[in-house]
Image (cartoon, grey):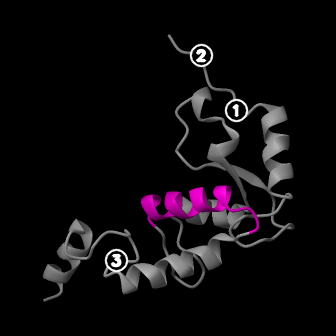
Amino acid sequence: MSERYTGIPEPLRKEVLERDARRCRWCGATNRGADLHHVEYRRGYSYDRLDNLITLCRQHHGFVHGTPAANGDTITKAVAQTVLQFLIEHPGTTGLSTWRSFKRRWALEGRCEKHAEKKDACQDCAYESRRFK
């Protein structure tokens, strides 16, 4: 039987917060609380790694888990993981600007902005287009 998960070890938590300058990596805020988010969703201690954790404010932690933003924007798990992994690999970048940049690039490449897949291959987009015809 596996050990019961008890949370991110304190030394790792401090290392992630220091790396991210205690800022939300999505918006850059320092005054909204600091949550640590697993980019690949946690399934035990093996997911507690510096390259899989990122600092987010409470608002944007909820957003990457599917809570709509105040303006109605939503993000899918796959796209959130893509953006957050990019942020870990590129210190100094923020999620909002990166997500907008990715969406523009995907539009030019004929990809859907919600799933980052080719529009003709995206099952969700194909379903939506058939549904509203």
Quickly name the residue at label 3: 112
Distance from the alpha carbon under mark 2 to that under mark 1:
12 Å
Q: Residue at x 60, y 20 (%)?
A: 4
Q: Which of pointers 2 and 3 lies earlier in the amino acid sequence?
A: 2
Quickly name the residue at label 1: 7
**What stretch of residues is rendered in magenta?**
76-92
Could you say which disc has been placed on residue 3 in the image? Answer: 2
Q: Residue at x 82, y 52 (%)?
A: 19
What amino acid is at disc 3? Answer: Cys
Q: Quadrant of residue 83?
A: bottom right
Across and down, in percent, residue 44 comes to 57, 29
Q: Which mark's residue is nearer the viewer, 2 or 3? A: 3
In the image, residue 84 above or below residue 27:
above
The answer to whether marks 2 and 1 mark residues whose Cβ atoms lie closer than 8 Å is no
Q: Which mark's residue is nearer the viewer, 3 or 1? A: 3
Distance from the alpha carbon under mark 2 to that under mark 3:
40 Å
Element class at badge 2 = loop
Q: In which quarter of the image is the C terminus?
A: bottom left
Tell me, yes or no, whether the highlighted magenta stretch contains residue 83.
yes
Q: Residue at x 32, y 69 (%)?
A: 117
Distance from the alpha carbon under mark 3 to that under mark 1:
35 Å
Element class at badge 3 = loop
The answer to whether marks 3 and 1 mark residues whose Cβ atoms lie closer than 8 Å is no
In the image, residue 53 above or below residue 132:
above
What amino acid is at disc 2? Answer: Glu
